[in-house]
Structures are given as structure tokens and as C-alpha cells.
Image (tube, grey):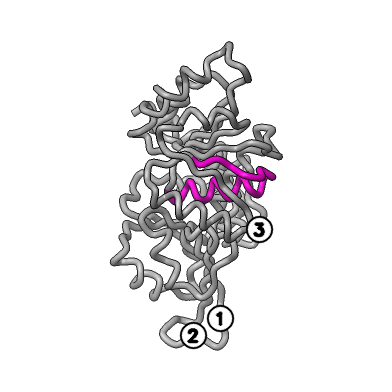
Amino acid sequence: MRAAVCGSPITHSLSPVLHRAAYAALGLHDWEYGLLEVDERGLPALVASLDTGWAGLSLTMPLKRAVLPLVDEVEDVALAVEAVNTVVVTARTPARPGRAGVHLRAENTDVHGVVAALAEAGARRVERGAVVGGGATARSALVALLRAGCPRPVAVVRSPARAEELHGVAARLGGRVDVRGWDELPSALQADVVVSTVPIGASADVAAVLAPAAAPGGARPAPLLLDVVYAPWPTPLARAWHGPVIGGFEMLLHQAAAQVTHMTGRSAPLAAMRAAGLAELRARAST
């Protein structure tokens, strides 16, 4: 069986290390997991080529929305978030015209990744949560906070267009979100959990605003921070934070474990995947 992670650029992806470690631990020695450089123009041809020899695809940017019209079924969370990071391939009888006897189901395991990472850090239920950023990962983080019990998460975004997207995501799930502009970034510190989805290039700017305000001596303890960046680590925001911090690797690990379970039908070997991923990150950091 075959599986692969697809996106552009893709060479940095840690997914092959995690999935291959899972296959080895599960004894799936005839399974392989590859790395495919694919952009939005090349995605339709790749999806059309999937057959019963494939278990699934992991998707990263810029493919998380582009794949939606190309699959047979989209699970509820992926539909609400309008972002897919997993396509599960199963045999289909009779075959759909133009497709090699397979059924393609789109999933979003990023939401599970955030929920599981927070739960491991002790935040199984979130009363007050905030998301910094407005892209696909931010939409997943918003849903994760709603699922963790947060009645009305705060989202701090730069773009008014992003605000409309986040309102739509919450509404599709029967929830609400309080969207604020970038000039209100310190308002995120009123939460118990902050999920930063900003890229590494913006991390220092966010740290310059949030870290001083979260310094000891404030009216309340600094929130738990989940910074979704996993490399390079620590980010400027994580280094400057005055409270507990979860790295993006934990989110990546748990979303990959969910992918393994979806694609293989077996419980993912989390310990083996974590050990392999951390070893790879150490090796990359040393070079």
C-alpha cells in the first residue's frame, strides 16, 4: 500500500518520518509513504490517478481547499473548516466513472491534533480560548476550542476577509466567535489558552506585543500557549512567553497519528512516532 504527503513546498515535511515510524511499529513492512511536490494545478491529475493500491494522502498548503471538489465525501469537520489535510482511499464497487474503483473521503485531523495536544498539557476543557491568525490552521484551531468547550473563542486577525471566514466556520458548527482586529492583539491574553497560528516570520512581531503583557506580576497568570510552528523551535514567541508552552510538534504528531489510524484501520503507535519525530528534529537542528 502507498500513501504520501503532498504540497508545495514539501521537502521540509516531517510527515514521512512519522508515518514510516508508524508503519514499522505496526509491522506494515509492505507499506510505503512518500513525499510529492504538488501544487493546485497538479492536484486533479494526482487525485484521478489514485487506485486501490493507495491508502491515502496527507495534504498541506496550498491544497487544503483545492481538494474539496475532487473527492466523493467530506466529513463534517472538514466541511465546516473548509480545509482538508487527509484523503482516505477505500475500494468502491461499482467504480465511479473516471476513477479506478476507489472512494475518496476527505478528513481534517488538524482539529484533533490541537484538541489532543491541549489535552496532554492538561487543558481538556477550555473556558476561555483565543486564536491568533486567520488562515486554514486558525480555522482548525477555532473548531478545536469550540470542541474543547469554549463557548465563544476570541480570534485576532489582520484581514476583515478572514473575520468573515471565521464567523462562517463557527456558525456552521452552531457556535460563535469574537473576531478582533490586529490592534487588539493583547486581548488574547484574557484567555486561558492561546493558539498562535502565525508563521515563523511573524513570530517576533507577535512576541513583541504579547510577551511583555504576559510577564509575571500581571493581574492573572499567562495563558497556556500552543504555537503551531514546529521548526525552527523554539520560535521567538515561544522563547519570550512567560507561561507554559506547547510546541507545534505535538499538534503535528497527533494529527499524523489520526491519519495513520484512518488509513490503516489500526491504532497509531504514538510513542514510536513521537520518538522518531523528535530524533529527526534534533538531527535537523544540529545541521
Q: Nearer the viewer, residue 65 or 153?
A: 153
User: Which residues are the magenta region?
Assistant: 135-155
- Seen in the picture, residue 15 relative to 29 is either above or below; the reply is above
Seen as rendered, the residue at the extreme left is 41
Q: Nearer the viewer, residue 60 or 23?
A: 60
The amino acid type, in three-letter code, at marker 3 is Arg
Quote the CA–CA distance across marks 1 and 3: 20 Å
Check residue 253 for magenta coloring.
no
Q: Nearer the viewer, residue 269 or 120?
A: 120
Which residue is found at the position 45% from the left and 87% from the top? 97
Which residue is found at the position 55% from the left and 28% from the top? 189
| SS at circle 1 | loop
Mark 1–mark 3 contact, CB under 8 Å?
no
Q: Nearer the viewer, residue 97 or 276?
A: 97
Measuring from the top left, give residue 258's x and y in whole percent. Answer: 60, 53
Nearest to N terminus: mark 2 or mark 3? 2
The amino acid type, in three-letter code, at marker 2 is Arg
Quote the CA–CA distance across marks 2 and 3: 27 Å
Nearest to N terminus: mark 1 or mark 3? 1
The amino acid type, in three-letter code, at marker 1 is Arg
Task: Tell me the number on the disc at residue 92.
Answer: 1
Mark 2–mark 1 contact, CB under 8 Å?
yes
Measuring from the top left, give residue 129's x and y in whole percent. Answer: 60, 37
Assess disc 3: are there few (<14), some (14-19) or many (≥20) residues with their C-alpha within 10 Å of its C-alpha. Answer: few
Question: Mark 3 = which residue?
Answer: 266
Question: Mark 2 = which residue?
Answer: 96
Measuring from the top left, give residue 112's x and y in whole percent. Answer: 60, 50
